[in-house]
């Protein structure tokens, strides 16, 4: 009887661990997706700012030539 109880406890803990692993995988994928989106937004803003700065420089140069 004691051995059976022990096995049941082991199985119970294994089930909990597997459930946690599945949940953690889902959370990890969601977290990675959020971080990727955040980085993409930052990079797009950075590129926009760079384009604006370069655009201003070219604009000033163009008007100085005239």
Image: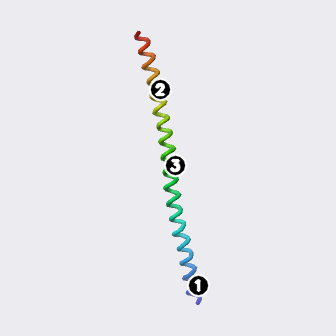
Residue 53, labelled with which disc? none
List the residue tagged with mark 3.
34
Q: Which of marks 2 and 3 is nearer the N terminus?
A: 3
- The quarter of the displayed image where residue 3 is located: bottom right
* Above/below status of 34 relative to 24: above
Write the residue at 49% across / 43% down: 39
Eye-nearest disc, 2 or 1 = 2
C-alpha span from label 2 to label 3: 27 Å
Q: Earlier in the sequence, mark 1 or mark 3?
A: 1
List the residue tagged with mark 1.
5
Eye-nearest disc, 1 or 3 = 3
Write the residue at 42% across / 16% down: 61
C-alpha span from label 2 to label 1: 70 Å
| Residue 1 x/y as whole percent | 58, 90
List the residue tagged with mark 2.
52
| Residue 60 x/y as whole percent | 45, 16
Circle 1 packing at 10 Å, graded few (<14), some (14-19), many (20+), is few
Which secondary structure, mark 1?
helix
Q: Which of marks 2 and 1 is nearer the N terminus?
A: 1
Which quarter of the image is occupied by the C terminus? Answer: top left
Between 1 and 56, the one lying in front of the other is 56
| Residue 38 x/y as whole percent | 51, 44
Which secondary structure, mark 3?
helix
| Residue 9 x/y as whole percent | 58, 79
* Above/below status of 40 relative to 10: above
């Amino acid at each position: 009887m004691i051995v059976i109880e022990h096995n049941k406890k082991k199985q119970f803990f294994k089930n909990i661990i597997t459930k946690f692993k599945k949940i953690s995988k889902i959370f990890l994928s969601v977290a990675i997706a959020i971080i990727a989106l955040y980085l993409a937004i930052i990079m797009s803003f950075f590129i926009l700012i760079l384009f604006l700065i370069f655009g201003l420089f070219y604009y000033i140069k163009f008007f100085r030539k005239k």
